[in-house]
Image (tube, rainbow, N blue to C red):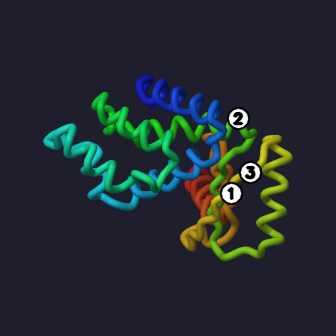
Amino acid sequence: MSQTADRYAKALFELAQEQNSLEAVQNTLTDIRKLIFDLSEFRQFLTNPLLSYDERCAVIKALFQSKVPDLLYRFLLFITYKSRLDTLGEIITSFDSMYLVSTRQMRAYVKTALPIKDEDKAFIDKHLHDKFQQKMITKWILDPSLIGGFRIFAQGKLYDYSFKDQLDHFFQQSTRLS
């Protein structure tokens, strides 16, 4: 994460708090992050050095004016003016981190080999909450390559309870013994 992105994210975060629009800005930034991830044309727009300031503003206006919180719209125009539109993804990531800390929440990604029941999801969420003492925002991902079991990625650590991992360890141990 760049210091520049962190500074812009912090400024936006503080303004959103002051204006009581933190939730709205966070939700909209989540949608914009999805645009960045899903649409290569949008990613190209953000980083295209050949577009003039006026062209960039026209696109921002067409995409976001009256569709996002006013604070965020003005912020997008501001970072366009400062030629920092290419750091929008990093700004969003930094803002998201600040939001999670301020709301005592944490993201976890759980990969399972098979679909699991809601009560099993609740059980895992409860244990994660107990371990980290934060409200969990869990994303559930189906990954049949795990064969069985599950993997949890939270706070930069991988907790691997998959059969695939256990088999890999077994084969590594058995080749060392040979």
Give the CA distance from mark 2 to mark 3: 14 Å
From the viewer's perspective, tell me whether residue 8 is left or right of residue 107. left
Q: Amino acid at mark 2?
A: Ser
From the viewer's perspective, tell me whether residue 178 is left or right of residue 118. left
| Residue tagged 3 | 136
User: Which of the two residues, 65 or 156, is positioned nearer the viewer here?
Assistant: 65
Is label 1 or label 2 in front? 2
Is label 2 or label 3 in front? 2
Asked if the residues shown at circle 1 and circle 2 are in contact, with their CB atoms under 8 angstroms apart, the answer is: no
> Considering the image in quadrants, where does the C terminus appear?
bottom right
Q: Which of marks 3 and 2 precedes in the sequence? A: 2
| Residue tagged 2 | 102
Asked if the residues shown at circle 1 and circle 3 are in contact, with their CB atoms under 8 angstroms apart, the answer is: yes
User: Which of the two residues, 53 or 10, is positioned nearer the viewer here?
Assistant: 53
Q: Is residue 29 above or below residue 3?
A: below
Across and down, in percent, residue 148 comes to: 66, 71
Quarter of the image holding residue 99? top right
> Considering the image in quadrants, where does the N terminus appear?
top left
| Residue tagged 1 | 138
Q: Which of marks 2 and 1 precedes in the sequence? A: 2
- The residue lying furthest to the left in this view is 50
